[in-house]
Image (cartoon, rainbow, N blue to C red):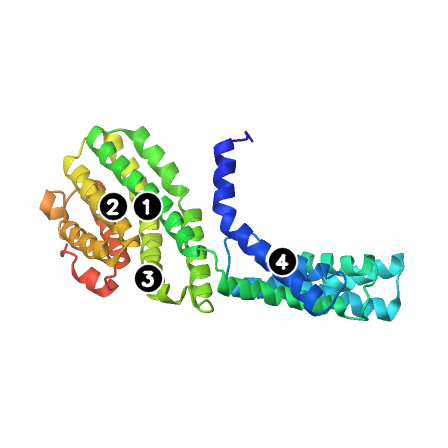
């Protein structure tokens, strides 16, 4: 893979909030365990805080608690077995075997099991600290609690990440609609094939958008600084769900258009419909910035959905051609739902066929 300076700089800039949060949390965790509680070398307070926060886009408190719990279980389990069976090569193997088995019983996550196993080995191999048994477990608890605390008081900006994910998805949808417009106007199969390849890559963007929103909503429940954004986040969830379904239907439309235009006939009316849908979707994308755009997009989409009657274009008896128009109907319903309209109300706007 070719190294890119611009890509590296972009990655650092995007990671800056996480870096700052992790540094502050690790420092606070160490300071509390060392300066307040007097622990000589509270390494596990630092490692648990760093690992629990991490650089993942999933910043949900539940994920942080799960990661910290896994690490603390590994630490405590190793300390118990260390007291019970002592040190040695076979004892180390037994500790790791028990730690991994217990972790797999607790959780189906492979990452969780590895976290438990690594922490168990660190406890087992490292010299015992001063202060008696379970000091390291207490340090782990401090690290996990600090990670959760800093998620609330210094939250990352999952809203910004969600908006960026949404923007990437809208770009693909708009590019695909514009490609369909050109393809049916110029009878260009190559353009449709490119659009099909492009729209097939959209699902990971939907999944990223969904995860970013889930993280933002979860953080808003514990962070006083994110609480005011809950309503906006709920609106964006509705937008995401509608766009998810719309993108799935768009893939079907693209495949059908690919089949249709192989007869070599241009279709200006379809090009005009795709142009209208693209314009309305571009306005819908601005709904990420405020609700007014959603109202404007809804009005434009309603104007389009009222046109989706094969009889209007004289193709009611042409199954191949009418099928494309009929496939646009569920696509428009999904876009209307994304704009905030109820599905039943959107369906009621469909012309009878």
**Of callouts 4 and 1, which one flags the residue occurring earlier in the amino acid sequence?**
4
Foreground residue among 96 and 199: 96
Badges 4 and 1: C-beta atoms under 8 Å apart? no
Q: Is residue 256 visible?
A: no
Q: Residues within 10 Å of mark 2 (few under 14, many from 20)?
A: some
Q: Check disc 4 and report its element: helix, strand or loop.
A: helix
Q: Residue at (20%, 52%) from the top-left corner?
A: 297
Whether residue 268 is situated above or below residue 211 in the rendered picture: above
Mark 2 or 4, nearer chain start: 4
Q: CA distance from mark 2 to mark 4?
A: 45 Å
Q: Nearer the viewer, residue 345 or 297?
A: 297
- Quickly name the residue at label 4: 27
Q: Which residue is mark 3?
A: 232
Contact between marks 2 and 1 (CB within 8 A): the answer is yes
Q: Gap in Å between the C-alphas at discs 3 and 2?
A: 19 Å
Residue 343: image location, x then y, percent? 25, 63
Q: Quadrant of the N terminus?
A: top right
Nearer mark to the viewer, of 3 and 2: 3
Is residue 165 among the parts visible in the rendering? yes
Compute the Cα span from label 4 to label 3. 33 Å
Considering the image in quadrants, where does the C terminus appear?
A: bottom left
Report which residue position mark 2 lands on. Answer: 282
Camera-side mark, 4 or 1: 4
Query: Does 253 appear above or below 21?
Result: above
Q: Position of residue 158 (x, y in %)?
A: 44, 56
According to the image, label 1 marks what residue?
170
Mark 2 near mark 4, Cβ–Cβ under 8 Å? Answer: no
């Amino acid at each position: 893979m070719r190294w890119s300076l611009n890509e590296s700089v972009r990655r650092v800039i995007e990671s800056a909030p996480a870096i700052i949060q992790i540094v502050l949390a690790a420092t606070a965790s160490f300071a509390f365990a060392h300066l307040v509680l007097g622990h000589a070398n509270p390494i596990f307070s630092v490692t648990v805080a760093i690992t629990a926060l991490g650089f993942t886009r999933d910043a949900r408190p539940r994920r942080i608690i799960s990661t910290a719990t896994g690490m603390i279980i590994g630490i405590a389990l190793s300390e118990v077995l260390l007291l019970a069976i002592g040190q040695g090569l076979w004892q180390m193997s037994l500790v790791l075997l028990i730690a991994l088995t217990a972790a797999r019983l607790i959780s189906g996550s492979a990452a969780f099991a590895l976290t438990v196993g690594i922490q168990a080995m660190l406890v087992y191999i490292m010299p015992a600290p001063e202060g008696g048994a379970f000091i390291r477990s207490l340090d782990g608890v401090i690290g996990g609690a600090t990670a959760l605390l800093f998620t609330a008081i210094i939250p990352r900006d999952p809203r910004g990440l969600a908006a960026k994910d949404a923007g990437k998805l809208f770009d693909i949808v708009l590019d695909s609609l514009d490609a369909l417009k050109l393809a049916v106007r110029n009878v260009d199969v190559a353009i449709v094939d490119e659009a099909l390849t492009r729209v097939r890559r959209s699902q990971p963007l939907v999944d990223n958008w969904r995860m970013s929103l889930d993280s933002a909503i979860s953080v808003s429940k514990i962070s006083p600084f994110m609480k005011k954004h809950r309503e906006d986040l709920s609106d964006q969830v509705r937008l995401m769900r509608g766009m998810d379904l719309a993108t799935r239907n768009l893939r079907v439309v693209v495949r059908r258009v690919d089949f249709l235009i192989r007869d070599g006939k241009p279709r200006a009316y379809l090009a005009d419909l795709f142009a209208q849908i693209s314009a309305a979707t571009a306005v819908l994308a601005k709904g990420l910035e405020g609700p007014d755009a959603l109202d404007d997009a809804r009005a434009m989409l309603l104007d389009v959905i009222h046109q989706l009657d094969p009889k209007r274009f004289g193709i009611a008896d042409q199954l191949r051609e009418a099928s494309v128009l009929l496939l646009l109907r569920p696509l428009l319903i999904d876009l209307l739902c994304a704009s905030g309209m109820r599905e039943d109300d959107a369906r009621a706007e469909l012309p009878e066929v």
